[in-house]
Image: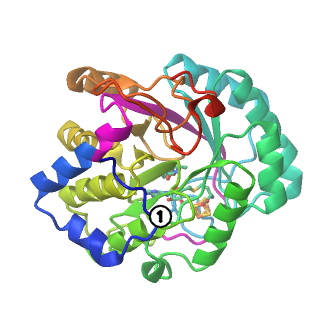
Amino acid sequence: MPTEIRHDWRREELLALLALPLPELLYRAAAVHREHFDPAEVQVSTLLSVKTGGCPEDCGYCPQAQRYATGVDAGKLMDTAQVLEKARQARDAGASRFCMGAAWRSPKDRDIPKVAAMIAGVKALGLETCATLGMLSADQAGALRDAGLDYYNHNLDTAPEFYGEVIHTRQYQDRLDTLDHVREAGLKTCCGGIVGMGETREQRAGLLQALANLPAHPDSVPINRLVQVAGTPLAGTAELDPFEFVRMVAVARIAMPRSMVRLSAGREQMSDELQALCFAAGANSIFHGEKLLTTGNPDVERDQALFARLGLRPMPLSRCEPGHGTVAATGATVHADITEPASACGCAA
Ligand code: SAM
Ligand code: DTB
Ligand code: SF4
């Protein structure tokens, strides 16, 4: 029987999953992964910071906050031509999605046409488009959709009760409101969080609960491991046990079976073995390319070698929606919304 898609997860259930013996947790997550995806396929996204640093917010983890001395200089919004050149390089290196990030609290209305031009250009290169620009109004979300935006990334970051220890300049509800605007505009949502910020396991369950009980599961769920940057308040936080990170990935997979679960920030500091465990636990998406926004990511050769050693392949763009396509292992054809007729989604499967 296929796993039920639920939006009523209780904290204790998620905590109980996080506490399972690791082999049992991996087994359960791997089973759910196979119901909806080919476990050998990993979706590949590339990130570009189109507007770096100088951010007025106070996110305690972030090297781009103006108020922390991190050595990140504030820059202007990049030229569209430069962005498109980077997008072309990412596509030629195998990326299927290009994500543009800006260190803004929220975009000004005058920024929207500039970002819209970038989105239209990236889309014309045959890439899926994603942007992460801070809080959005409903009108801004609609304008980005009209420009050809596929995904909007906006993270909940952590459990509601831990949030106030990390960020003071915007509220949890502001994030939920932006996610509503994004969803209501018909954009796909990319929403996850960060672990290793000193939160408890119960608070990690709280983040998973907040994500899985959103009105629709995020299409992509980035799980970031805190990249500690000198000068930020969270630099010096005790390192999270790597197995806790694996547990987080596994429970994200179980709670949000059809979502792409992305191994996001922190991969550069992970061993190949730890990444392999995360793929076994149901992670099926990564950021590829030598830089995230301002911090490092594994170099291209290391990722190519890792994929080859693990027998993984980049997920082709023809999987038109998360969870769509043929599951090679079982031969089953699945669609993200099983109430939707196969023909309605335009999926080749
Ligand atoms: N300014 C926009 C915003 O905050 O929504 C978009 C860019 S912001 C850098 C996107 C996300 O990156 C944050 O929500 C956070 O989850 C993640 N992030 C930022 N700095 C990080 C760090 N040092 N380690 C891990 N994740 C980080
Ligand atoms: C997400 O969840 N992680 C990415 C993306 N969304 C925009 C960003 C990670 C940033 C890591 C710190 C940096 O490179 O500045
Ligand atoms: Fe600004 Fe985004 Fe960094 Fe927060 S995470 S300081 S909003 S760039």
Q: Residue at x 83, y 48 (%)?
A: 143
Q: Relative to the observer, which residue lies in front, 186 or 135?
A: 186
The residue sitting at 39% across, 65% down in the picture is 208
Asked whether 172 falls inside the magenta stretch, the response is: no
Q: Position of residue 138 (x, y in %)?
A: 80, 61
Residue 279 appears at what percent x and percent y? 27, 40
Determine if residue 234 is in view: no
Whether residue 154 sits left or right of residue 217 in the image: it is right
Looking at the rendered structure, the number of numbered marks drawn on it comes to 1
* Mark 1: few/some/many CA within 10 Å (<14, 14-19, 20+): many
Q: How is the image coloured?
A: rainbow
Q: Is 320 situated above or below 191?
A: above
Residue holding disc 1: 211
Callout 1: helix, strand or loop?
helix
- x 74%, y 60%: residue: 136
Span colored in magenta: 32-61
Q: Which of the pair 20/53 is nearer the observer? A: 20
Residue type, numbered disc 1: Leu
The quadrant in which residue 346 appears is: top right
| Quarter-of-image position of residue 242 | bottom left
**Does the magenta portion include 35?**
yes
- Give the side of residue 110 with respect to residue 220, left or right: right
User: Relative to the observer, which residue lies in front, 131 or 33?
Assistant: 33
Image side of residue 174 versus residue 211, left or right: right
The answer to whether any part of residue 65 appears in the image is: yes
The percent coordinates of residue 64 (x first, y second) are: 58, 58
Name the residue: 77% across, 53% down: 141
Position above or below: 150 against 105: above
Q: In this view, does 124 lie above or below 265?
A: above
Judge from the rendering whether residue 73 lies leftward or rightward of residue 62; answer left or right.
right
